[in-house]
Amino acid sequence: MNATARPTQMSCSDAEWKVRCDLAAAYRLVAMFGWDDLVFTHISARVPGPEHHFLINPYGWLFEEITASSLVKVDLDGQKIGESDAWVNPAGFTIHSAVHEAREDAQCVLHLHTVDGVAVSCQEEGLLPVNQTAMLLNGQLAYHDYEGIALNHDERPRLTADLGTSNVMILRNHGTLSVGHSVAAAFSFMYFLERACSIQIAAQGGGTLRMPQEDVQSVVESQSKSMSHAADMLVWPALLRRLNRINSGFDS
């Protein structure tokens, strides 16, 4: 991207710049947690305002390199808004645009291809409520069957119908997806989903699984309701402090 074409804090509204900083941080945190897949997969966020505009990464950048000013503004078709030398992959925005359009509350959409997430997506029973982390997602987890690389816009209505009002989804034979009312919420939902997948893969290699009773699962589900608010108030500020210690500069 040409540096002269990049948005700056002075050229954006305070609300847009805040989303830019949070989204850039999410990209770097994904890399820090080892969830990235070279330059593939995406995280998108809605730009505050009446227009249906969104922010996404410049295609070809590593997630650890993303900054607030490098993010590209696109419309629902993945076409760039304004002048920019950045390369955007419209096909990579197919899933994201479908969710953003169908869900007004989906301010951020995060999609990954991690080893453990994909491994669970390949299992017939999907994510098992075998541990507390997985049970926190009871009632919020959806599934969507694989239809090939997400290039076909005809798939979008089926994907959003399967997602419904859920905040986390396993894309079968493909990967994981989360949405949230903020970047912080979407990231936190993904953390729990990915951690639950990793625990399941580890537990399956250690012997017969012990399943909690269904009434206990229901208790944990009811206890998880405040998770997204804790993400905004507690988890996200702590993650930003950690990121500033390890890989600062995302807010430039």
Image (spheres, grey):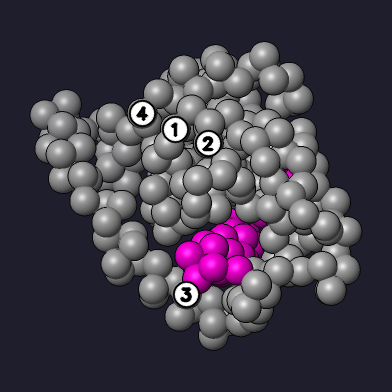
Task: Indicate the amino acid at tag 3.
Answer: Leu
User: Marks 2 and 1: CB-CB under 8 Å?
Assistant: yes
Of labels 3 and 4, earlier in sequence is 4
Q: Residues within 10 Å of mark 4 (few under 14, many from 20)?
A: some
Labelled disc at residue 103 = 1
Element type at marker 3?
A: helix
The vertical placement of 74 against 229, above or below, is above
Quadrant for residue 84, please give it.
bottom right
Labelled disc at residue 165 = 4
Is residue 103 among what the camera can see? yes
Task: Indicate the amino acid at tag 4.
Answer: Thr
User: Marks 4 and 1: CB-CB under 8 Å?
Assistant: yes
Is residue 130 among what the camera can see? no
Give the residue at mark 3: 240
Q: Which residues are magenta?
A: 12-41
Q: Residues within 10 Å of mark 2 (few under 14, many from 20)?
A: many
Relative horizontal placement of residue 163, taking residue 95 as reference (left or right): left
Real-space Cα distance between discs 4 and 1? Answer: 8 Å
User: Marks 3 and 1: CB-CB under 8 Å?
Assistant: no
In the image, farthest residue toward the bottom: 245
Real-space Cα distance between discs 2 and 1? Answer: 5 Å
Give the residue at mark 2: 100
Real-space Cα distance between discs 3 and 1? Answer: 27 Å
Real-space Cα distance between discs 4 and 2? Answer: 12 Å
Q: Residues within 10 Å of mark 3 (few under 14, many from 20)?
A: some
Relative horizontal placement of residue 107, taking residue 92 as reference (left or right): left
Task: Indicate the amino acid at tag 1.
Answer: Arg
User: Marks 4 and 2: CB-CB under 8 Å?
Assistant: no
